[in-house]
């Protein structure tokens, strides 16, 4: 199956991964609708392609979402809308569960009701948590170590059970960490680039944490290939590079690329997480077999592109320009 000429809706399409996915979908000739409440995402991420897409501002928790699917005769849906940055879940766990789990459930049921042909639920390697063996394949036990990971795992498992219970045509994509331009959250790589643009001193959290990193354009291309794969429906599929780096190693690589002869790294206790995933390493064999996908961009190339992007955008990531107003953050209603 090819997505050429097909109507595809991307929730969270104004975000980091979402905006790259939209670009890849346009490349294969899909008709794209972005559905996003612009909480962490921004129209600026879609500036170059705004005339080729339809942007609908809306919330995945809205029960009226099904009407959008029906009205636009949407055939394929990617669900990326989420609260994805782990440390924010310490402040607003309700919001994470409301959006990442309940919002996803609303998307699944709406897709079923509207007769959507296929859905990709964007899950995460964080669901694996503490490594029992490496590299991690899809059978690795899940042991989530954050409220974010729990909220995503709940959606991941809802997708799986709804596939069997009501025939939801869903593919569960467990994405390992992504990096690249248009990042919207203070993940570790953009944070290192931001700090090193102001000098050679870094304040970071867990330096030993190791992550498997995929350049965002490779990830987006993979997500398109996976949707086009008939055999993937009902399956859990990992996507990652099969290589990992510690935060400390990344800091030195980025330091060199940014022209620093040496860098000084200090561990900032405030950045240490109460529970942290020490190591993630993807076994992407299933993805490879199903789609033939391979990452194309090396870590060094991808980081260079990301650094150039930062400098050509006024040395500010999106969140450094845009602070989310307090009243837009969903909190548990007071019982008073
Ligand atoms: N970035 C990574 O390394 C990574 C790795 C694995 C999985 N993921 C998953 O990929 C997805 C995208 O992550 P990202 O890093 O691009 O983050 P992001 O914050 O850039 O993207 C999330 C998007 O969802 C939108 N959104 C948030 N709440 C919404 C709501 N209630 N209704 C509609 N839209 C809403 C935001 O405005 C934003 O555009 C998430 O589901 C995340 O869990 C990300």
Image (cartoon, rainbow, N blue to C red):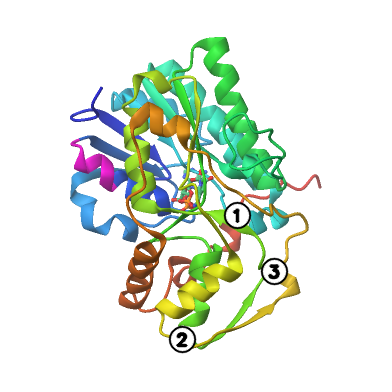
Q: Which residue is at 66% across, 59% downward?
A: 87
Q: Which residue is mark 3?
A: 271
Q: Nearer the viewer, mark 3 or mark 2?
A: 2
Q: Marks 1 and 2: CB-CB under 8 Å?
A: no
Disc 2 on helix, strand or loop? loop
Above or below, comparing residue 38 to residue 103 in the picture = below
**Predominant SS of the magenta segment:** helix
Residue corresponding to mark 1: 329
Residue 235 lies, in percent from the top left, at 49, 23
Q: Residue at x 62, y 29 (%)?
A: 139
Crowd class of label 3 (few under 14; some 14 to 19; many from 20; radius 10 Å): few
In the rendered structure, which disc, 1 or 2, sits on the residue that comes first in sequence? 2
At mark 1, the secondary structure is: loop
Name the spot of residue 57 as percent of width and height, x first: 39, 45
Q: Which residue is mark 2?
A: 260
Q: Which residues are magenta?
A: 23-29
């Amino acid at each position: 199956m090819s997505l050429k000429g097909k109507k595809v809706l991307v929730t969270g399409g104004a975000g980091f991964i979402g905006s790259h996915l939209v670009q890849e979908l346009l490349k294969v000739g899909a008709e794209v609708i972005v559905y996003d409440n612009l909480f962490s995402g921004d129209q600026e991420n879609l500036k170059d392609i705004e005339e080729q897409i339809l942007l609908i501002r809306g919330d995945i928790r809205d029960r009226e979402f099904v009407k959008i699917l029906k009205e636009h005769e949407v055939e394929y849906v990617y669900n990326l809308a989420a609260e994805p940055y782990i440390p924010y879940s310490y402040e607003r766990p309700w919001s994470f569960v409301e959006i990442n789990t309940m919002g996803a459930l609303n998307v699944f049921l709406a897709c079923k009701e509207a007769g959507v042909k296929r859905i990709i639920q964007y899950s995460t390697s964080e669901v694996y948590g503490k490594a029992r063996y490496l590299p991690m394949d899809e059978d690795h036990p899940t042991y989530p170590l954050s409220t974010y990971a729990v909220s995503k795992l709940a959606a991941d498992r809802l997708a799986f059970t709804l596939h069997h219970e009501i025939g939801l045509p869903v593919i569960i994509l467990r994405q390992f960490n992504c990096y690249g331009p248009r990042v919207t959250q203070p993940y570790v790589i953009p944070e290192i680039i931001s700090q090193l643009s102001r000098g050679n001193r870094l304040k970071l959290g867990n330096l030993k944490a190791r992550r498997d990193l995929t350049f965002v354009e490779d990830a987006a291309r993979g997500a398109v290939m996976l949707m086009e794969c008939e055999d993937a429906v009902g399956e859990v599929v990992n996507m990652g590079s099969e290589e990992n780096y510690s935060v400390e190693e990344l800091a030195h690589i980025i330091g060199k690329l940014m022209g620093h002869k040496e860098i000084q790294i200090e561990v900032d206790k405030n950045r240490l997480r109460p529970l942290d995933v020490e190591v993630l390493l993807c076994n992407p064999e299933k993805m490879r077999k199903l789609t033939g996908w391979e990452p194309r961009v090396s870590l060094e190339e991808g980081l260079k592109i990301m650094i150039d992007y930062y400098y050509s955008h006024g040395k500010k990531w999106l969140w450094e320009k845009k602070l989310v107003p307090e009243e837009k953050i969903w909190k548990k209603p007071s019982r008073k």
